[in-house]
Image (tube, helix red, strand yellow):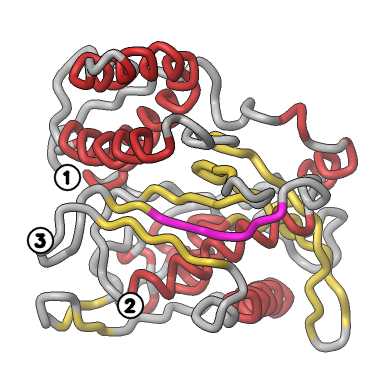
Amino acid sequence: MGEFMKFNPNKESLGDRGAEAHTPELLESYNNSAYAWQPGMAKHLRVSKSSLNAHGWCGYSYKMKYIYRLSEVETDDMVRGTNVHNIVEYFWDEAPSRIDETLTLIADDKLILAKELMYSVIPTPPKPYLLGEEEVIRQWFEWQWNRFLLTKGVNWAAAGNEVSAHALINVEVDGEDYPVHLRGYIDTIFADGEGGFVLMELKTGKWQPKKTAKKLREEMQFYKLMLDEGEFSDWLPVTHWAWEFPRGWVNGGVKAEWELEEVGTKITRYAPKTVQNKLKKLVKAHITDSFEPEPFNYTDWKGNVVSSCQWCSFMELCPAWGNNIDSQTEIKLEDE
């Protein structure tokens, strides 16, 4: 990992944002849930999009991070992503206040001044970025500016920004229902102009056609499930989901990638069943206390065969690599 600088201009934490919107029953359910759930506990299982993805990647890595609560090594990609998300969160909080003035400048044919005014919403960090964040933010803003010109500011700003969502669902495993608390933050939600809403996910990695789309549809379905089953279900119908990759394609062929898909079409309809199956698999792993290492090889976009373990923070504790967690460290399992 190289050098980095962290910058968060936001006034409130994600944990604070939108908490007042949740019903007392859902907040009580959240407080009575735990990642380290086991059968017989008074609490029930807590699942986030990240924890579900982690279990799908490797059961043992999931156990280390979410049950034993061990920290991952912070990488350049993680820091870059956090910095960019912090700026985008700040932008959508502040930009709506500039819409009228920006439209006035555009009407007066002062397009350059209008763009500079809107771009000035983006705060300058106390020290220069070291991981390419500035270029990612610039690419992201260019797309938002083009959207602004196209929409003339109508339904341009985010209707929801870093939306905190909860839902309590039942997951059936071997004929028995288990309560599961879903928890997550949706980057942005936009009105589609026809009574529906678009879930938007910002990614600071790079786009890989087909492979990335399949994974993202499952992530967006997790968010949609939270909204459909949670406190937003009556007034926030999700009609589309979308994602933005300001850094472009992995092969460098395209500067930026933006995708929008209608929910429930032939290409997206598999996602709900896939998410349900993943939830069942995760609950069953907790019931049976089965979190085995799952190393595998895959071919990256350059055609190289690489190990799924190469970025794992827990290799030194993993039996797949001849190690044993009990001989490496003493861990206290906490009931969250």
- Please rate how many residues cluster around mark 3, counting C-alpha atoms within 10 Å: few if below 14, some from 14 to 19, many from 20: few
Marks 3 and 1, how far apart at CA: 22 Å
In the rendering, at what x and y percent does residue 148 appear? 37, 34
Q: Is residue 276 above or below residue 75?
A: below
In the rendering, at what x and y percent does residue 309 appear? 29, 71
Please report the bounds of the magenta region as a residue range: 237-243
Q: Nearer the viewer, mark 2 or mark 1?
A: 2
Check disc 3 and give the amino acid type: Gly
Residue at left offset 78%, top offset 73%: 171
- Please rate how many residues cluster around mark 2, counting C-alpha atoms within 10 Å: few if below 14, some from 14 to 19, many from 20: few
Disc 1 designates what residue?
A: 1
Check disc 1 and give the amino acid type: Met
Disc 2 designates what residue?
A: 210
User: Which element is circle 3 on?
Assistant: loop
Q: Quadrant of the N terminus?
A: top left
Mark 3 or mark 1, which has the lower sequence index?
A: 1
User: Which element is circle 2 on?
Assistant: loop
Observer-nearest residue: 211 or 238?
A: 238
Relative to 295, 151 lies left or right: right
Disc 3 designates what residue?
A: 252
- The dominant secondary structure in magenta is strand
Relative to 176, 129 lies left or right: left
Residue at left offset 55%, top offset 46%: 186
Residue at left offset 51%, top offset 33%: 154
In the rendering, at what x and y percent does residue 225 appear? 69, 62
Q: Is residue 243 above or below residue 133?
A: below
